Amino acid sequence: MVMSATYRQSSKAGPQQLAKDPRNQWLSHGPRFRMDAEMVRDIALQSGGLLVQEIGGPSAKPYQPPSIWEQVSYPTSDTVRYVQDHGSSLHRRSMYTYVKRMALLPNMDAFDAPARDVVCTRRQRTDTPLQALVTMNDVQWVEAARALAERVIREGGPGHEQRIDRMGLILLSRVPPPPMAAVLEKSLGEMQKHYAANPKDARALVSIGEKRRDSSIPEPELAAWTMIASEMLNLDETLNK
Amino acid sequence: MKQHPLCSDCENKITPMDLPIPSGLKKEWATCESRRRFLGRTGKVLGWAALASLFGEASLHYRAFASGPNLQTGSGINNLGLPHFAPKAKRAIYLFMSGAPPQVDLFDYKPNLAAQFNSDMPASVRGNQQLTGMTAGQARFPIAPAHWPFNQHGHTGTWISDLLPYTARMVDDLTFIKSTNTDAINHEPAIMLMNTGNMNAGKPCLGAWLAYGLGNMNDNLPTFVVLQTKTNPKENNQPVSSRLWSSGFLSSEFSGIGLRSVGDPVLYLQDPAGVDRDTRRRMLDAVEEINRQTLAEVGDPETNSRIAQYEMAFRMQSSVPELTDLSREPESTWDLYGPEAKEPGTFAYNCLLARRMAERGVRFTQIYKRGWDVHDNVVGNLPVLCQETDRGCFALVTDLKRRGLLDDTLVIWAGEFGRTVYSQGGLSQENYGRDHHPRCFTVWMAGAGVRSGFSYGETDEYSYNVVKDPVHVRDFNATILHCLGIDHNQFTYKFQGLDQKLTSPVPAFVVQGILT
């Protein structure tokens, strides 16, 4: 079935398809939906080469803002305080994240991960500003953006164009078409200028997260590329299947 | 709205026979189907779900509101037909006293009990009431009268415990319901019943229903906000969980957003170190430009929604700090709320934020204060709990009134059940404890839609059974909805084959007696 033309068709929907088949009930185009919480996080980690591939083992406790568990727990509970892990546990696949049903990891909760307290036959797929805040500001994503920036600088070659192409291939499975590349190029220019003039900001940005940064890359350059990686991680196209 | 279209409960039934799929697959389905009939409904639904996942989301597209329906536009009646009638209250603030305050020590004055100190509760009064495991084994049920004196206050001469000197000053603005009663005797089911109308998890809470039904009045702040009061480690803090502000089967965009006193007020609100506002703006401009290209290329309306949500996130990054910036509050604010209100996370601070949110059009604010579960050492714990909350409650109601906001804001104060008049554990002249009691408890309301300086319902002389005008939790919730212009019987959402409503399928009645 996965080889069928129906399954493999593009998710592009022209005006005619949208008018005749607005809910895609007749499969006039391919499926397109915002990915589930775990996939969104895993893709961010994978893109920068952070994702730990190890199978099984104890649950992981990645980055979490302060006072999520403390606020709700019974004082004598054995999960009253969240003790964050370090090292590779910060980058394990999201399915291995420890689940406290009373207080979900908020970056997963924002993307409609179920709380496991009632049966979930179908996940919701909302689109909220809180999700934007997670993928722009959560240390997990900022660190992942920096790792992705380091990767394309390392792998993409010396030119901007090749690096942007590489980032597109990693996240979108395609070379960014010229209009998209033009926006990213322009943005890169602005960011490079900004961080060259504000080296303290550059250092602050590339120091986020426990993963050590690649010190061979000048901080302003890495900061600028980190912002470009963050832009790409926040694209509608990246967040959707 | 968000039901699974392949779920057999959905109004738009699609069967695999209708889908453009190979006939062999249809045949296979038909074979399975006859076998599934034996397995019953659950098997069928699971089968549907499995097939649906093969086809991905595309055939199932149901779009939620990008944001809640907006009451401020057009005729004032949104596409759900809400409000059903002109609302008295546009917004509500719910002060939730988690753990269950002892009504007999605070509001439900029983002067005759003093003479019965340490005498046994008559079995006829206790009747067949089930007790918790914590007191069921007690040999005696000795009466523990309130340790503190009561006095009359206001024009109405309302009796209030001396523990609540501030509440005493506003009794003429409040409606007390002394005959509230519930079905649950333990915290989790009782607090779920109060908030969601059902003891089991999975149903939307009051705030989610309001967010869904009435929508937002401010595009830059959440519709439904939850504030948690910092816990006092010396108190018996029963847990609260996100189930209490969950949207259940409604779209999760209607669940409560926590406004926190530790770290970012809204999670992940602050830009990372090294990213200033201009840089964020430039980054968002680039993202938006590319997203518009995607929209033109792919034609998915959801992309439009994503662009709007990123803009909302950017606006929230300014509107939330503005909300929590108390530096421009005049001195009179601190005179009213007290110095504690300057400390983030205190009850008084949360009350002040609730007023600021009411001003800015937040539809529903719920403040949780934990610690009221006084099984023992009532004499030690209760004064602290009252001192922590009394002034904040008074300041909030008074402040809303001064600003004219009480005219269209409903304020609610309630816990999940009451407490026993007999002592749990040892009773002495100096101290006692109180166990859970579902048969009666006192709540109060103030503001839009409800009478002021009024008391409704009566309990017997032991504050054990309701003797006049009982108000079940369902009735209480129906009344809150009524104040906001909603007929609880008409406000339904189809889920699992039932027209679900906040007040459950069991009949509920608006408490007409307390309405203006």
Image: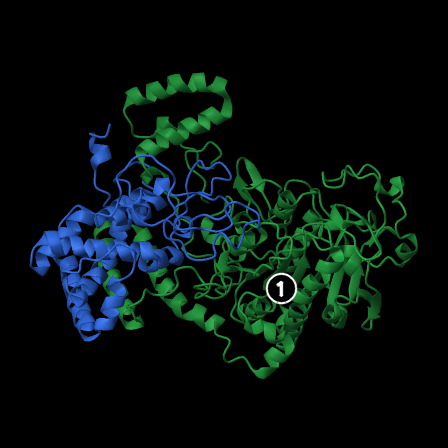
Chain colours: A blue, B green
* Circle 1 residue: B89
Residue sitting at the far right: B115
Quadrant position of residue B359: bottom right
> Is residue A198 depicted above or below B309 in this figure?
below
In front here: B152 or A35? Answer: B152
Q: In the orientation shown, which residue stands out farthest toward the bottom?
A: B331
For residue A186, what is the image quadrant? bottom left
Q: Secondary structure at mark 1?
A: loop
What residue appears at the point 23 percent right and 63 percent down from the top-left corner?
A: B286
Name the one closer to the observer, A150 or A190: A150
Residue B323 percent coordinates (x, y): 48, 71
From where the camera sits, is residue B299 visible? no
Image vertical order of residue A46 relative to residue B136, above or below:
below
Q: Which residue: 74% across, 45% down?
A: B438
Left or right, B426 with respect to B404, comes to right
Q: Residue at x 29, y 27 (%)?
A: B21
Residue A98: give x, y in percent of width and height: 41, 43
Task: Between residue B512 and residue B287, name the one nearer to us.
Answer: B287
Q: Quadrant of the C terminus of chain A?
A: top left
Is residue B295 left or right of B140 when viewed as pictured? left
Residue A179 in percent (x, y) is at: 14, 59
Identify which residue is drawn at 84% across, 38% down. B127
Q: Chain of mark 1?
A: B
Q: Position of residue B506 (x, y in %)?
A: 68, 40
**Which amino acid type corresponds to the residue marked 1 in the rendered image?**
Ala
- Location of the N terminus of chain A by quadrant is top left
- Could you tell me if residue B150 is visible in this image? yes
Graded by Cα atoms within 10 Å as few (under 14), some (14 to 19) or many (20 or more), the crowding at tag 1 reads: many
Q: Total of numbered circles in the picture?
A: 1
